[in-house]
Amino acid sequence: MATRRRPTMKDVAEHARVSLSTVSYVLNGTGPVAPERRDRVLDAVRVLEYSPNGSARSLKRRRASTIGLVVPELTNQFFAMVAEGVQKAASARDVLVVLVVPDATEQPEEKQATLLRSQRLDGVVYLSGTGSLPTAILELQRSGPVVLVDEQIPGFDLPAVVCDSRRGAREVARHVFEHGHRRVAVIGGPSALWTAQQRLAGYREAAAAAGLDTDEIPVLVGDYRQESGARLAAQALAGPPGTRPTALLCANDLMAIGALEHCKAAGIRVPQELSLVGFDDLPVSGLLTPRLTTVRQPAHDMGFRAATALFDLLEPGDAPPGGLGMLPATVQLRDSVAPPAVPG
Amino acid sequence: MATRRRPTMKDVAEHARVSLSTVSYVLNGTGPVAPERRDRVLDAVRVLEYSPNGSARSLKRRRASTIGLVVPELTNQFFAMVAEGVQKAASARDVLVVLVVPDATEQPEEKQATLLRSQRLDGVVYLSGTGSLPTAILELQRSGPVVLVDEQIPGFDLPAVVCDSRRGAREVARHVFEHGHRRVAVIGGPSALWTAQQRLAGYREAAAAAGLDTDEIPVLVGDYRQESGARLAAQALAGPPGTRPTALLCANDLMAIGALEHCKAAGIRVPQELSLVGFDDLPVSGLLTPRLTTVRQPAHDMGFRAATALFDLLEPGDAPPGGLGMLPATVQLRDSVAPPAVPG
DNA sequence: GCTCGTCACAGAAACGTTTCGAGCAGGCTA
DNA sequence: TAGCCTGCTCGAAACGTTTCTGTGACGAGC
């Protein structure tokens, strides 16, 4: 017995004794079809177990019903949460989400653009994370809509869903300064990234408001990964005891966790000897000892909004590219901040 | 100026003054083409910025160069790590990975099968996680290759990449019993899942070896999520002090973390008053206080192998469905296990 | 009783590839 | 020189949809 091939619309049409176009009309709900013939078609579909060929459909419709999701790394739970939000918005529209993790690939940037141009993706939600060049985004953007998450490129007004990182950073830093810290260090993100710049700016605003000379605050540049947090914490705390910072402002939770890791290894007690704050509020951050004081971003919501905005862009029917705008970032006060051991 | 349409092979052919088929031969490396004409084609491709239309290609080739990745939830870092492994194997072959998160969707199971039948996915890597019915997998499997990760369905010999959960569970439990614990409770995974069964079996083997009556060990059934860990820990520890278990064997780290969360809230000191072990070795597990004793699964590698096996299945050219087999699970001894407060 | 619209339907032309078969040179063996 | 292979090239037919255009039938209006 020959392996039976998958049924096509033609088979359905013959089985239902109607034309190809009628089947198409029934399946898509376009065009008027008499009830009796509609039922015949639907029956045939059921009997033959027909399901439409997505490739042919994409080819004809000039739309893949698929979007890309570029994530720097999945093991960062913040990205994972955003990804779930994107998934949710997409699945509600029967749109597939293809995952692109540039770091796991060899030729990252070029491939991405090629991918979009190959008509297999209608658009892209882009999470810039560990410091890739934003110029790649512009290249992408030439051939299809791109919505940024937590990123903005000065001078190019690309659609983006962002959080008020600056304000969040300012408030969490203010919390630190209100405890009396005067010598602090910043473990920042990749300086090319908008979030890194915003958070740093927020820290500086708070420092200035506390009467500090912002130029004297050391800024160590990390890559938003745990390892760099540990390494830079070691570096920041290397000086002689009297001159060491009493608090570390980390631009994301992962680096704060790395810093905490270093402190445990080095026998530095947190928060008694060193205060620590992060950014993102990962699910795990509340479980550490001490529980990490940080800033929460509505990750799931950001992903959902970004995807929704992308769909609005793709079908400029009804709504303007809404949903964009600045989401609040809220400080989560917990246990990793305490007054410095030696005030002043 | 009219918005210029995307160039097609026809445009390339005209620009290079060759036929359509010649262009195709050059692009795919199939069929002999004289060097001089080959260069003409390649030039034209560059000049016109041509890139092939993926939909048309898929339609003609009867292959989408896309696989599906079904994950119960991304925020579980174990799944995220597996996903990265899958990504890596796929991107090496220019295959796209579409993410399917049934929980984020409304009609989970039915949609998945439909998806595979629509020729938009060549195959699927399936991570069964929080307890969906394995029967859905069989339905999927009827219309395309499916490779399971950390799951096996008795009676159906589906390709799967698994870890030796049973052995890992046995050894970590033995470690607990060697510390003198006699009253333990199991916080298990969904009983429909192979991993849950295996791990429970491993725990029981160790208990039997320690001379315990395995029937007397309470088994609380969770769903591999943190919340259920916290809830079930509360339940397990509810009895009067003398009868409470002195150790909790948790079938994955997330539930162990939940249990730890409950202990902190309830003022139960770990490991002094209660020992705790998990399974998976999430990146975060070594950072908790106390650091969690658990069993490491090579998550990234599992994902990579599963995807590789899927590709072998899709192109039955060279290798047999290799890469399948049982990977080792290695115990990570850390600080969450100590002798019971009152031995005996 | 004829034309005119409307309503259902069918035919056929795309969409952009891949690939089979045929054609057409030119060099080789008899 | 006739025949034959070999190497390159092209035309054309798919692949399975969507959708434009055309065409009967039918009722209404003069």
Image (cartoon, coloured by chain):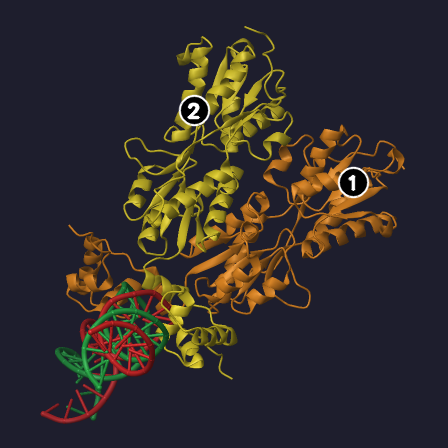
Chain colours: A yellow, B orange, C green, D red
Please tell me the numbered disc located at residue B235.
1
Against B56, is B170 above or below?
A: above
Identified by mark 1, the residue type is Gln
Q: CA distance from mark 2 to mark 1?
A: 43 Å
In the depicted view, which residue is nearer to us: B154 or B317? B154
| Labels in figure, total | 2
Subunit of label 2: A
Observer able to see residue A158: yes
Q: Position of residue A170 (x, y in %)?
A: 46, 20
Mark 1 element type:
helix
Q: Residue at x 65, y 32 (%)?
A: B288
Residue of label 2: A166
Amino acid at circle 2: Arg
Where is residue B8? Give x, y as percent: 24, 61
Q: Quadrant of the C terminus of chain A?
A: top right
Q: Locate residue A156, reporting x and y percent.
A: 28, 35
